[in-house]
Structure formats: C-alpha cells, structure tokens
Image: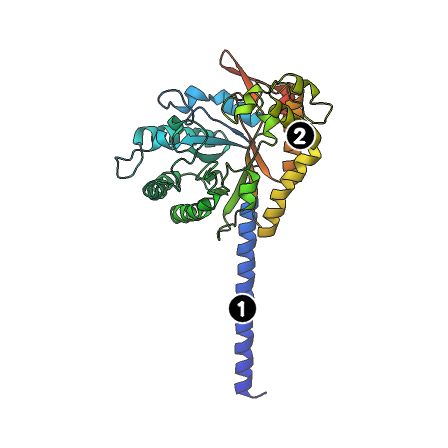
Amino acid sequence: MTGKKRKLTVLLILILVLLANSYGAQVQIQGGQASVSASRYSHFLRGINLPYWFWLNQGKVQPLEKRFSSADLNLIKELGLTFVRIPVDMANIYDPQRKDKLNPVALQILLSGIEKILKSGLAVNFDLHSISQEAGGSNYSGPLGQDEKFTAEFVNFWQRLAEKLAIFDPDRMLIEPMNEPVFLGEEYKWPPIQKELLQAIRKILPEHTLLATGAFWSNLPGLLALEPVDDPNVWYNFHFYEPHIFTHQGATWGEGYEKYLRQVPYPSSPESVEQAILLVQDETLKQYLRAYGEQRWNGQKIEAEILKAVAWAEKYGVRLLCNEFGAYRDYCLPPFRQAWIKDVRLALEKYQIGWAMWEFDGSFGLVFRKDGRPIVDKALASALGLRLR
C-alpha cells in the first residue's frame, strides 16, 4: 500500500469512527429522552382533581390551606395517588388592564399553593379549566374561535402565564392549556388554534410536557378526529364519562333529561333497567333507558371504547392521559358507581394510560367531609386500587 493510499485509508476510518460515534450519541440522546419521558409519565399515573380552589371557588381566591390542608395532601399521597390536577378559571388570574395580563395577587396565591403541593411529593397537572366560570354552563372555552381578538389575547395571556410556570420542575408539572374545548358544530376550528397555542407556549417552556385534547368537551370523538402536532413532548388527553345516562343521573347542569333519572344500574341489561324505567314518566326517557339496557354496558364495552383511543395513540406513536372520569355520587347507587369506576380504572391501567378521577371531595368525590376532616369512601378507594389504612 502506498503512503498516499494509507493516509486515505486512515482518514476514511477516522470518518467512519466519527460517524459511528455521532450515531451512537444520537441513539443515547434519543434513548435518554425516552427514559426521561417514561420517568416523567410515572409521576402522572394515578391522580385526583382538586376543584373549588381556583375553579368554582366561592368569593375571592384563598390560600391553598384554606381549601386543601396538609392533611388532605398527605392523605392523597398515602392512598397511592401520584398527582393532583388543579383546575383554574382564567378569570381568577386574568387582568386585561395590565400589560402582562395577569392578576399579581391571585397569581401569587396560586403559585404558592402549587409549590406546597409539589413539596408534599405530589406532581401537578396545571389545568386552565374555563375562560370564565361566571358565564355559567359548560361551554368552558367560551369565545375561543368565535372572537378573533380574544383568541389572540388568549395566546398572549398563556405566554405570560407560561413565564410564571417556568419555575416549576418539568418532570412534575404538566401543562394543560385548555380543558374541554367545546366548539360545538365547529369542532374543526379548535385544532389550528390549539396548534398555535402549543407553539407559543413551547417557546417559553422548552422542557415542560404540554397536554393537547380534542374539541367536543374532550370526548373520544374529538380526540379521534385530531391530528397530533409536530412536538414529541405533547401528550394527548381525553375524558371518559360514558354512558352519561348512568354517570350523570340526577345532574341538573347537563342534558335536560338527566335530572329526572334515578336508580340507573351498572352493568346494564334489558332486565336491570326495569326499575329505573318505572321511575320516569316521559316516554322518550323510557326509550333512552331501554336503549341503555340493550347496549349492555359492562367492563368489556368500556374497554372497547377506550381501545379506540389506544388504537389512535398507537397509530401516531403518542402518549395518552385520561384526567377526568367519574360518576355522580348523589344519585348513582354506591355498588353501581363502584363497579363502573373499577371497570374504567382497570381498562385505563391495562393499556398503561395515566388517569385522574373527578374529584377529591365534591359530588363526584373520593372522600366525604366530617367537621372538615376527609373521610375516605373505602369501597370507592378499593375500586380505584388505592392503598387503604
């Protein structure tokens, strides 16, 4: 071999080694990202919602301990829950007259409370739950997509809010820009707005995981119609309350017919719904109940519904979260409610989907209050697979 050829050969080998090392480094980086993502997801496996602090609060917002004590947070941890979801009404922290669009007093109360929760060892799903609770109803996204000026203002508001949330550990703070966007009959308007919103937040929060969702109240059809954004650090969320005829029986805020329902059973069959049919007068409602019985809702049917989300996520290679599911305890008979919650939880865990039940201590709650102290519904906690004292 001539000297010239030897030099070329050595140079070629050096180039190949450098390329190999570069490829190996990329694999390690990608593997590291995957492991970080898996580690981060482990903080959001089992959660509970904490409303009535910064969402549906009575009067002015108060420090966390006025609504949820250290004992509450310790109980949540002892039960084996890993995170809490904090619903926030935009109106509580929004000040359109200020340049930064943020109410400094309310925001400080919120940030201090989040810090206490994180120090307790729980992770936090920050949830912008509604534009304005004072507007009433369940159109949580309000003028988004309807009012161009407000939509632009909303993106700007979120960038300023993201600057404040940047202080929190990305591994233990999940950012949810909009809960249950509605866009009823115009669902196609939401994805481009969400894409713009996620991109704007990402500029401020390069490391935090963001949570995307579909229109139509984050129901499964909205998720399945969604095309994921080009951002590997976005997870995808859906809510599960199916079938509403069971989970929302007696509710006065949803579909008009729901408030008349009583003793709707789960699982359902033509035979099991007979008592519930006898308790209503409206013939249309009787037909709804008969259909519910014929649909035979049970664990298998719930799993089949959740599998739709699983198939969608596998198609796009993305992670899922279900941060709301539950049943109205004021009217769902306890054995039926426990069975439904257990079946949903088992289906979610079977496909390794992190979850958060709605809610800690309200009308869908895991605990009751006695003289302010939380008393765990042990049968429900068992249905959730939680640790009992």
Q: Which residue is mark 1?
A: 19
Q: Which mark is first along the chain, 2 or 1?
A: 1
Q: Nearer the viewer, residue 16 or 317?
A: 317
The span from disc 1 to disc 2 (Cα, nearest Å) is: 63 Å
Q: Which mark is residue 291?
A: 2
Single out the residue that lies furthest toward the front: 283
Decide: is 376 above or below 132: above
Please give left or right for residue 362 compared with residue 377 in the image: left
Q: Give x and y (percent) for residue 351.
A: 65, 41
Single out the residue that lies furthest toward the right: 271
- Name the image quarter holding the N terminus: bottom right
- Answer whether residue 80 is visible to the viewer in this image: no
Decide: is 269 above or below 19: above
Q: Give x and y (percent) for residue 262.
A: 61, 18
Secondary structure beneath label 2: helix
In the picture, residue 23 is in which quadrant?
A: bottom right
Q: Nearer the viewer, residue 326 or 269?
A: 269
Amino acid type at image mark 1: Leu
Please give left or right for residue 83 compared with residue 311 in the image: left
- Answer whether residue 278 is visible to the viewer in this image: yes
Q: Give x and y (percent) for residue 354.
A: 58, 37
Amino acid type at image mark 2: Ala
Secondary structure beneath label 1: helix
Tell me, what colour scheme is on the image? Answer: rainbow
Single out the residue that lies furthest toward the top: 371
Q: Which mark is residue 9?
A: none
Q: Give x and y (percent) for residue 16.
A: 55, 72
Report the residue at 39% width, 23% height from top. Answer: 63
- Name the image quarter holding the C terminus: top right
How dense is the environment of label 1, judged by Cα within 10 Å: few (below 14), some, or many (20 and up)?
Answer: few
Report the residue at 53% width, 73% height from top. Answer: 14
